[in-house]
Amino acid sequence: MKRVCILRLGHRPFRDKRVTTHVGLAARAFGADGMYLAADDPGVAGSLRDVTARWGGDFFVEDGISWKTCVRSWKERGGTVVHLTMYGLPLGKVIGEIRGKEQILVVVGAEKVPGEMYGLADYNVSVTSQPHSEVSGTAVFLDHLFEGAELDRTYPDAELRIEPSRDGKRTVP
């Protein structure tokens, strides 16, 4: 069974709370199993856990982790590390190869990513070679990885669900 997790690297608690939360929300919605946060930010972690509790699923969040330890232990267990960067190889050229991997850690940066990350990654992947957000990069990468199958995912344990509507907003408890 494929396991895909996100590592948020470089999160600055005083500045990046909203973007990091949205990286986690996109990761959860687009099929990732969980997120490691290389910063101590219980507020972001708690917010994502709350969403998972209400909207369902098993998405986990671990904050306060060392990014190097996370990457190295992932690789030691046979996993593949994919670093999303606009300087990497084009997504379309490598996604087929990556799709065949069973354990994928997707590294998403915030502030300046240490140069060492480029060497530790098995793949440095560019979603586009233009500036864009970490949220869009995460979503587009996961959508390509799962080939759109994540769009139909449902969570039987959800307390809240959207009832599709053409002309309003409806949630079902």
Image (spheres, rainbow, N blue to C red):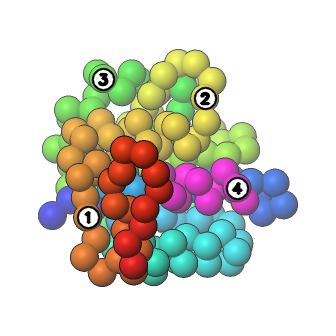
Residue 121 visible? The answer is no
Between 34 and 76, which is closer to the camera in this rendering? 34
Q: Which residue is mark 2?
A: 132
* Displayed quadrant of residue 68: bottom right
Which badge, 3 or 2, comes first in the chain's sequence? Answer: 3
Q: Which mark is residue 92?
A: 3
Query: Marks 2 and 4, Cα distance to the nearest angstrom?
Result: 16 Å
Query: Marks 2 and 1, Cα distance to the nearest angstrom?
Result: 29 Å
Which badge, 3 or 4, comes first in the chain's sequence? Answer: 4
Q: Which residues are magenta?
A: 17-27
Q: Which residue is mark 1?
A: 154
Query: Marks 1 and 4, Cα distance to the nearest angstrom?
Result: 25 Å
Query: Marks 3 and 4, Cα distance to the nearest angstrom?
Result: 29 Å
Residue 20 colored in magenta in the image: yes
User: Where, quadrant-wise, is the C terminus in this rendering?
Assistant: bottom left
Which badge, 2 or 4, comes first in the chain's sequence? Answer: 4
Q: Amino acid at mark 3?
A: Gly
Q: Disc 3 vs disc 2: which is toward the camera?
A: 2
Query: Marks 3 and 2, Cα distance to the nearest angstrom?
Result: 17 Å
The residue positioned 58% from the left and 41% from the top of the image is: 134
